[in-house]
Image: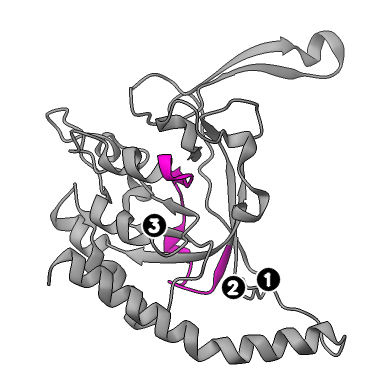
């Protein structure tokens, strides 16, 4: 089936589901307005288990350009002062981190200006680990989104759509970044898939790899199309295999330095 057909199919399915729930939503709103019940957020309902989706990192954590992403320098030593602290030099796009719109635009939204309500997200996880075993540069395609919607229902507005490729387990090895001959190789999103997600009011996409684009990308097509649309991405996520495909809520602890193009983030999921 062509990408355009898949996009139309998913959108039609989403619209029909929304129509079914429209009357119920209106009734609930009326009851809430009358004070008879408490409003429930339009987020995944959490039962209390917290999963950390963030890698701990130091200067040995893999980076896209191979340069250490964080450097430590003692600023105050305990032996001298009775307390201690580090001076840190941190590159924005290292470790588990956010790509803000400003990363791939001249004047887009900085990481400090991301809307807070877009940082609490229903979490949808697409498992591409099987195809990634056969192809290090495997991508999420529109048909993967179609299959997810068929199995789990519509993608909620404001969602974080992330893929689990199994790459997080490779962080300690050169295979996380490269083939043995030194070429970039890791899974990513296809532009066709993110073009579809952009029509569904998705807030962010997330990957368990170094980049939103696959390792063999020559043009950063996903970065160049997704981020300028005002959306953000999260790279180097961990522990996605510990969560169900649907039903969790992600809390994205975005840094808030003015003019930031992104930065290391603490990302937690509650299910």
Q: Which residue is located at x 32 percent, y 49 percent?
A: 167
Distance in Å between CA atoms under marks 3 and 2: 20 Å
Residue 113 horizontal/vertical position (percent): 63, 38
Q: Is residue 225 visible?
A: yes
| Left or right: where 126 falls relative to 230 | left
The residue labelled by disc 3 is 198
- In this picture, which residue range is highlighted in magenta? 228-249
Marks 3 and 1 sit apart, C-alpha to C-alpha, by: 30 Å
Viewer-nearest residue: 19 or 10? 19
Nearer the viewer's eye, disc 1 or disc 2? 2
- Callouts 3 and 2 close, C-beta under 8 Å: no
Label located before the other in sequence (3 or 1): 1
Closer mark to the observer between disc 3 and disc 1: 3
Task: Give the image location of residue 20, x and y in percent.
Answer: 49, 91
- Name the image quarter holding residue 220: top left
The residue shown at (23%, 61%) is 141
Whether residue 233 is in magenta: the answer is yes
Secondary structure beneath disc 3?
Answer: helix
Q: Which mark is residue 174?
A: none
Residue 49, image quadrant: bottom right
Which numbered marker is on residue 48?
A: 1
Q: Is residue 13 above or below residue 105?
A: below
């Amino acid at each position: 089936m062509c990408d355009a057909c898949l996009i139309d199919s998913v959108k039609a399915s989403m619209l029909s589901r929304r129509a079914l729930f429209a009357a119920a939503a209106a009734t609930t709103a009326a009851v809430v307005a009358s004070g008879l019940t408490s409003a429930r957020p339009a987020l995944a309902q959490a039962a209390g288990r917290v999963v950390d989706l963030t890698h701990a990192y130091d200067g040995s954590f893999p980076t896209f350009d191979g340069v250490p992403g964080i450097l430590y320098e003692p600023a105050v030593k305990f032996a001298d002062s009775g307390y201690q602290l580090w001076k840190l030099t941190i590159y924005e796009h290292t470790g588990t981190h956010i790509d803000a719109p400003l990363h791939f635009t001249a004047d887009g939204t900085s990481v400090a200006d991301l809307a807070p309500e877009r940082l609490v997200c229903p979490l949808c996880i697409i498992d591409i680990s099987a195809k990634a075993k056969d192809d290090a540069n495997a991508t999420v395609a529109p048909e993967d989104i179609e299959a997810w919607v068929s199995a789990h229902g519509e993608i909620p507005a404001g969602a974080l759509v992330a893929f689990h490729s199994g790459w997080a387990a490779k962080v300690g090895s050169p295979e996380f970044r490269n083939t043995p001959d030194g070429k970039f190789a890791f899974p990513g999103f296809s532009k066709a898939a993110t073009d579809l997600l952009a029509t569904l009011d998705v807030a962010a996409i997330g990957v368990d790899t170094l980049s939103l684009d696959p390792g063999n990308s020559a043009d950063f097509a996903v970065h160049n199309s997704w981020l300028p649309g005002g959306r953000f991405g999260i790279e180097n996520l961990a522990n996605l295999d510990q969560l169900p495909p649907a039903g969790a809520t992600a809390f994205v602890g975005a840094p808030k330095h003015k003019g930031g193009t992104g930065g290391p983030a603490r990302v937690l999921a509650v299910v």
